[in-house]
Image: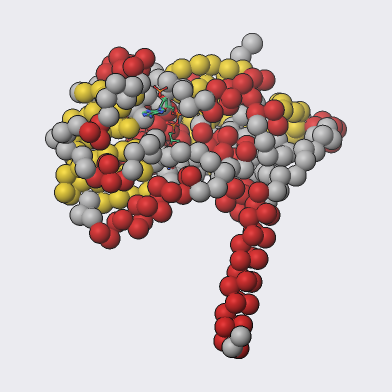
Amino acid sequence: MKLRYKISAGFFGLIAIAIIALAIALSYTAPCDDSPGGAAAAASGETMQAVRYSCYGGPEVLAVETVAKPVPEGNEVLVRVQSAAVNPLDWHYMRGSPYFMRLGSGIGAPADPRVGVDYAGIVEAVGPEVSKFAPGDRVFGGRNGAFAEYVVVPADRGITAIAPEVSFEEAAAVPIAALTALQAVRDKGQVQAGDKVLINGASGGVGTYAVQIAKAFGAEVHGVCSTRNVEMVRSLGADRVWDYKLEDYTQGSEQYDVIVDMVGNHSIGANLGVMKDDGVLVRVGGPKGDWFAPLKGPIGALLKSPFVSQELIVFVARITQEDLSAIADLMADGKVRSVIDRRFRLGQVAEAIRYSETGRARGKIIIQVDVD
Ligand SMILES: NC(=O)c1ccc[n+]([C@@H]2O[C@H](COP(=O)([O-])OP(=O)(O)OC[C@H]3O[C@@H](n4cnc5c(N)ncnc54)[C@H](OP(=O)(O)O)[C@@H]3O)[C@@H](O)[C@H]2O)c1
């Protein structure tokens, strides 16, 4: 074999070994740490109940533990959580799936034992640099560790006031789902009054907000859901509802300006067939899977994008104070409401997440944290 062939064979061999090693490392799941986490915390001062996990896996890895109650410092706000909400993101972190996300969440085991993001509650104390919030304020937002009695939040990120007429559970439902919907409809889809917009997955957490937000922007809104949710989606303002059990919107004759897709169950080509030439496809969610299933849609969009007139967008939402306030305003104006499906207690978070994983939630799943 010539030297250059040997060099290239060696080079590609090394790359193959590196990829296999990375795949093994990413898919490795360390056993759970059964040592009681709360003992040290309990000895050191005030404590709280919080959901924690020490290893990746199903809902059984979640446990309510006694841990140290956080103390707000500098620019931080301590919130006594009243309600929290479940998102698919919570079980993606719980399972460390898809595996590539472990590059951020921890290889082998979660780097951060806290669970939950969406919260609503009452400010209990503030750090010395905080002037915007005071004890007693009703607030909501997003912060890792929301499935707990208390959460500490930087005053300039992931926290804003709740309008007096909005309940804690309605507010807790908002952060990830409603901000994703807002950013998909307003920023990525750039929906304008008169646009024809399709929301695929209209009865889920993100979809219930997306229907209402697109409607609030003056669009003609079509939602896709199963038979049992048709009336609910219509009640949110949808002008037409496709019952996916009976009909397939990609086989219809409608031409959409914007499709916001939470499900990813139709190919990009099929979606393009029902979009106007200058239409926008916003991919919010897709099939679950440990390896390539979640990547297929985003990669397909990236590869197809240069060859079609429509815009194909894949995006990850961000929790910002401005957008929390924008949703709070829409709720205060009565243009957006939270659809609550089921309620669980803090000790039932595993059950709540198990329900979320079925993919059948109608609107949002609430964790009632501060109840007698
Ligand atoms: N990109 C981001 O930043 C971002 C942010 C948030 C969420 N996401 C992703 O977006 C997706 C949706 O999130 P979510 O919180 O809305 O989830 P969810 O609340 O669990 O969605 C459940 C809903 O999906 C509906 N559904 C299931 N199969 C469907 C189908 N074939 N056609 C139409 N609807 C269908 C279900 O309705 P039926 O029971 O009637 O089938 C149910 O109402 C997830 O994949 C999530 O990971 C992404």
Instruction: Give the residue drawn at x 17%, y 49%.
Output: 278
Instruction: Give the residue drawn at x 34%, y 17%.
Output: 227
Total number of numbered discs in the rendering: 0
The residue lying furthest to the front in this view is 1
Question: In the displayed structure, does residue 287 sit left or right of residue 44?
Answer: left
Q: Position of residue 101 (x, y in %)?
A: 57, 49
The residue lying furthest to the top in this view is 372
Question: In the displayed structure, does residue 342 sit left or right of residue 346?
Answer: left
- In this orientation, which residue lies closer to the viewer: 152 or 349? 349
Q: Position of residue 2 (x, y in %)?
A: 59, 88
- In this orientation, which residue lies closer to the viewer: 209 or 296? 296
Q: Position of residue 108 (x, y in %)?
A: 71, 48
Q: Assign the C terminus to one quadrant of the image.
A: top right
Residue 177 seen in the current view: yes
Position of 189 relative to 362 (above/below)? below
Residue 51 seen in the current view: no
Instruction: Give the residue drawn at x 34%, y 38%.
Output: 266
Colour approach in the figure: secondary structure
Instruction: Give the residue drawn at x 34%, y 27%.
Output: 202
